[in-house]
Image: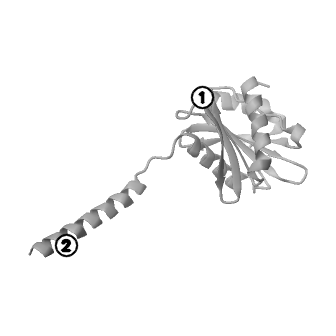
């Protein structure tokens, strides 16, 4: 009888632990901070960068409207980084929904058709964080936060190639240039 009760207790313990772990995953809240920002940017890249018909909602010649829209939705005026010195032109952008509120996605491309996505949104967690790399599949990104705004630059370029571009964006965002 003792061994049966001990075996039953072990079975119940394992079943309870396994069931609890599975339910934990089902009811888990979305991530926060830098990891969530990098994931949101990578997902935006995966969704919009391959689109050859309408990757952006508002084109670069209509950036005043996009800035006004983003300012209204995010409660802050976004910076539209200029990457032309690095060979990338702003194609345009769109507002996107994240689990943390509205975000602004900007898309850039170069003469070879290489596309980059920059996501910016207000940060509730990790409001001031240094630049960190992330990788998701074949997509690399650099993400950081400054003054309560998060930024993530994503592309299929190597992390080493992407880093100076992200650093340029960081500098422009911090100086308002």
Residue indicated by mark 1: 148
Q: Residue at x 60, y 30 (%)?
A: 128
* Distance (Cα) linking label 2 and label 1: 53 Å
Crowding at mark 2 (Cα within 10 Å: few <14, some 14-19, many 20+): few
Crowding at mark 1 (Cα within 10 Å: few <14, some 14-19, many 20+): some
Residue 137's tag is none
Which residue reaches farthest front?
Answer: 3
Q: Position of residue 85 (x, y in %)?
A: 89, 37
Image position of 48 with respect to 124: above or below:
below
Q: Residue at x 74, y 50 (%)?
A: 159
Q: Quadrant of residue 1?
A: bottom left
Q: Position of residue 14 (x, y in %)?
A: 29, 66
Which quarter of the rendering shows the C terminus?
top right
**Earlier-in-chain disc, 2 versus 1:** 2
Q: Is residue 111 left or right of residue 98?
A: right
Can residue 7 be seen here?
A: yes
Visual colour scheme: one colour
Residue indicated by mark 2: 7
* SS at badge 2: helix
Residue nearest the viewer, comparing 157 with 37: 157
Can residue 58 be seen here?
A: no
Q: Is residue 119 left or right of residue 158?
A: left
Q: Quadrant of residue 63?
A: top right
* SS at badge 1: loop
Image position of 103 with respect to 8: above or below:
above
Image position of 153 with respect to 69: above or below:
below
Q: Residue at x 56, y 45 (%)?
A: 36
Q: Is residue 48 left or right of residue 86?
A: left
Q: Residue at x 69, y 48 (%)?
A: 141
Q: Quadrant of residue 26?
A: bottom left
Q: Position of residue 168 (x, y in %)?
A: 79, 35
Residue nearest the viewer, comparing 43 with 131: 131
């Amino acid at each position: 009888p003792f061994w049966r009760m001990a075996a039953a207790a072990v079975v119940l313990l394992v079943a309870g632990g396994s069931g609890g772990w599975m339910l934990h995953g089902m009811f888990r809240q979305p991530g926060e901070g830098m990891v969530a920002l990098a994931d949101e940017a990578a997902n935006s890249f995966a969704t919009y960068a391959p689109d050859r018909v309408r990757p952006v909602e508002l084109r670069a010649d209509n950036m005043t409207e996009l800035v006004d829209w983003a300012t209204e939705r995010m409660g802050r005026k976004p910076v539209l980084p200029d990457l032309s010195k690095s060979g990338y032109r702003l194609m345009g952008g769109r507002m996107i929904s994240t689990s943390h509120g509205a975000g602004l996605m900007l898309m850039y491309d170069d003469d070879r058709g290489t596309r980059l996505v920059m996501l910016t949104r207000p940060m509730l967690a990790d409001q001031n964080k240094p630049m960190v790399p992330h990788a998701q599949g074949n997509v690399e990104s650099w993400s950081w936060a400054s003054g309560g705004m998060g930024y993530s630059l994503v592309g299929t370029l190597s992390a080493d190639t992407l880093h100076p571009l992200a650093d340029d964006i960081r500098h422009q965002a911090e100086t308002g240039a």
